Amino acid sequence: MDSKEILDGLSSAQRYLQEQVDLFGNTIYVDAKGKTAELPVSAPAALPDEPWAGAASLDALNESICTCLKCPLGNTRTKFVFGTGTPKADVMFVGEAPGADEDAKGEPFVGRAGQLLNKIIEAVGMKREEVYICNILKCRPPNNREPQPSEMETCTPYLAKQIDILKPKFIIALGRISAQWLLQSSDTLTAMRGKVHEYRGARLIVTYHPAALLRNPNWKRPAWDDMKMFKQLYDESKEA
């Protein structure tokens, strides 16, 4: 076996492992008896009794929480990444956390994954300016690692308040982590797709994270199936 074959084999193995992470995660939780445990999820539904919880607009909420230091990520961020889009949006896209480009600009989904998300939005006849885009976490995890449950638990009340102010009819959960956390489920991405879930009064649909689609273009077709399902439901809601 020559060096090229070895490199090709390693590259294929790396792609396969990344696909498994996208679908199933990269953390195995073990209980006290040494058995594999369910993914611990805890997405609080009630808003805390804090001043920001009374914000009447997205701008007011952002101003109230943009200096948050409740978890260590507040000390390592460059910019707080609140969200972007129209406050009148019927559709909300929710990812997991900002990346390097988002941390630098203070806006979600502005890198390569964001460019692909824009194309996905346009493919269903909408524009980025007509929807609302945000993440569960408002600060970037170091080295783009997966969000920790404690970090998501700290940030989820902010997301819940964004949803309560916006009152979207549809939420598109982008990727396994976002979907598992919002639905309080340890199901695989495959198991959560193709269904209509509910979260804080909105119909929630699960699809692939755009970054995963960049790593594995073969998932673009099933992702398009997810968006077609959403578009049909959205159009029906407009006709009702």
Image (tube, helix red, strand yellow):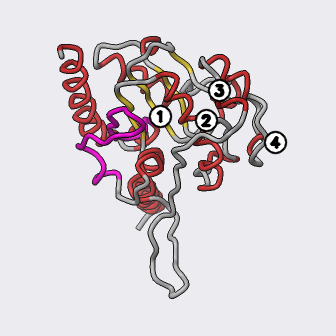
Q: Position of residue 22 (x, y in %)?
A: 43, 52
Residue in the image at 42% along x and 43% along y: 175
Q: Where is residue 130 in the image (x, y as percent from the top left)?
A: 42, 12
Q: Which of marks 4 and 3 is nearer the N terminus?
A: 3
Q: Earlier in the sequence, mark 1 or mark 3?
A: 3
Separation (CA) of disc 1 from disc 2: 13 Å
Q: What stretch is highlighted in magenta?
A: 189-210
The amino acid sitting under disc 3 is Gly
Separation (CA) of disc 3 from disc 2: 11 Å
The amino acid sitting under disc 1 is Val
In this view of the protein, which residue sits in the foreground, 37 or 174? Answer: 37
- Where 40 falls versus 190 (above or below)? below
Q: Mark 2 points at which residue?
A: 158
Q: Residue 94 carries which label?
A: 1
Quarter of the image holding residue 202?
top left
Q: Are the residues tagged 3 and 2 within 8 Å (C-beta)?
A: no
Whether residue 206 appears in magenta in the rendering, the answer is yes
Q: Name the residue under label 3.
A: 54
